[in-house]
Image: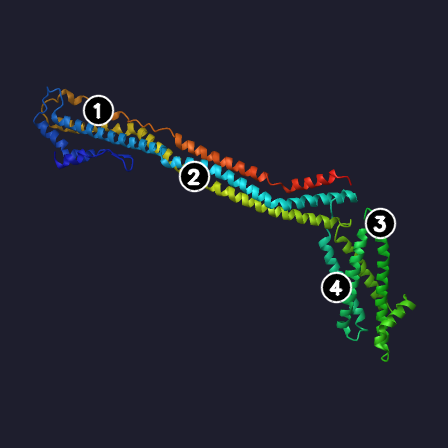
Amino acid sequence: MSATESTWDNIPGFDREKEQYVQLDLRQWLKDKKIKEEGEDRGRKNLPAAEDDTRDEFESEIVDWVNRRGLVCRGNVSGHLSDLERELADMENDAELTILENRVGELEQEAGIALERGIDAGRTRLTEQEAEVVTGSAEFERFRKRSKLTRLVDYSHRGKALWYIFGCFFAEIVLNASLLMDVNPFGLVGSTMQMGLISLVNVVFLGLVMGALLRLRNHVAAAGKTVAWLGIVPVVSLVLCFNMAVGHYRNSMQATLDNHSADILAMGNDVLQRLVDSPFDLASFQTALLVLLGVMCFGIGAWKWYQRDDAYPGYGRLERELKGKKDAYKEAYHREEETLGGIHEGFQEELRDMRQKLVVKQSKWKETCQRGAKLVEDYPTNLGQYQRDLEYLLAAYRTANRNTRRTPTPPHFDADVPVDEAILQPPSFNPPEETSLSGVAEKVNGAIIALQDEYRAARRQYETLEALTKRGVEEARAVPA
């Protein structure tokens, strides 16, 4: 066999690396085999003879070559499809699948144990806060029952009231200092310091006391109301006396300023004497205004101290204490949920990694099956070309022969020559069932769903704030007032 024959004899017709059918280069084969030249040469010799009814040696060579090429191509396709089937079988029987399946079962058990331990530890850590919320709720409810309170707590003015109190405090300092500065030997600075102390007594101290007494008068018990009214009268009297004393203090300072021989150390006795002898003799408009501003700032301060909390004494304080306990429980509850979520997420992440590996394998499985099916689907179209290739080569030889011969062509020149039937028969592709891959994938998905259910069930074992509050309220209502 020549080098050319050897080269052509190894043309595959199918590229297994690229999974592509390769068509025969007929023009090259016509050139290398000198088919037309051979046809013309044999035609000039009137060969084959007109009475010859069988193919000659050269025609048979063409038919054999095309059939051989077709069978080799079919064999290559069939072998490649068998490789794909083995690849799929190996994927189904992969040892990693068994490892994954076993690991899924282990993870389910480990996750259940870890979540159970996390719940036990979390409930132990939450015990103290749970008890505080229940006790606080019960105490708050009993307080409401005793006080006959059906409304919600209201201290919505708490923040704004404080600004009013500070405003009154500084306003009294500024306004009253301007009234004292003309009689104070130290001027504005001295009067500001004096009025700072006076405003502190008026707005902060006496105002705070009056605010508490105003709240106490709303007490359900008669004793509380009585104490409130018994306290309001002396506090108001004290405020009037204190501010009258401040007014007389200004008068005394004015007198001292007018009389340089007066003893400044006796000013206290002078103020007391003026307050006793003629308490309402304020002597000047500035003095009266000083007293009025003091009483007015006290009144505003007292009212805003009253608004700093709920109108019922102790109601707001108790509600804030309970809120603090609830906030502490919510924070602890959130921490425990995060801890439990971390346990769940750790196992969930490993299961998701497994699922991703299986998705990749299933994708590869599907792709391999599609590749094999595509080769089988394209086989008739591509291998049917061999019949046309044979007809083309024979036609080239017979036409060249017919054009140069002087005798009629043999009858078989007009007959069709079929290729080997085996060439046109598509090879089979029977991939195995995706049993193991699907089974493990379903098990992983089932484990993920089961783990989520376990996690949700685990979270429900922590008592919610609403449940604890309800339990405390029920305990309080179960005990007669």
Q: In this view, does 14 lie above or below 186?
A: above
Q: Name the residue under label 2.
A: 354
Q: Which quadrant would residue 405 be assigned to in this image? A: top left
Q: Mark 1 points at which residue?
A: 420
The CA distance from mark 4 to mark 3 is 37 Å
How many tags in the picture? 4
Q: What residue type is labelled 3?
A: Ala
Nearest the eye: 423 or 270: 270
Q: Are marks 2 and 1 in contact (CB under 8 Å)?
A: no
Q: What residue type is labelled 2?
A: Met
Of badges 3 and 1, the one in the foreground is: 3
Q: What residue type is labelled 1?
A: Asp
Q: Residue 472, percent across and down? A: 69, 41
The CA distance from mark 2 to mark 4 is 70 Å
Of pointers 4 and 1, the one earlier in the residue sequence: 4
Which quadrant is the N terminus positioned in? Answer: top left
Q: Which quadrant would residue 21 be assigned to in this image? A: top left
- Secondary structure category for the residue under label 3: helix
Q: Mark 4 points at which residue?
A: 170
Q: Which quadrant would residue 269 be assigned to in this image? A: bottom right
- Secondary structure category for the residue under label 2: helix
Of pointers 4 and 3, the one earlier in the residue sequence: 4
The CA distance from mark 4 to mark 1 is 114 Å
The residue lying at 31 percent from left, 32 percent from top is 86
Q: Residues within 10 Å of mark 2 (few under 14, many from 20)?
A: many
Q: Name the residue under label 3.
A: 223
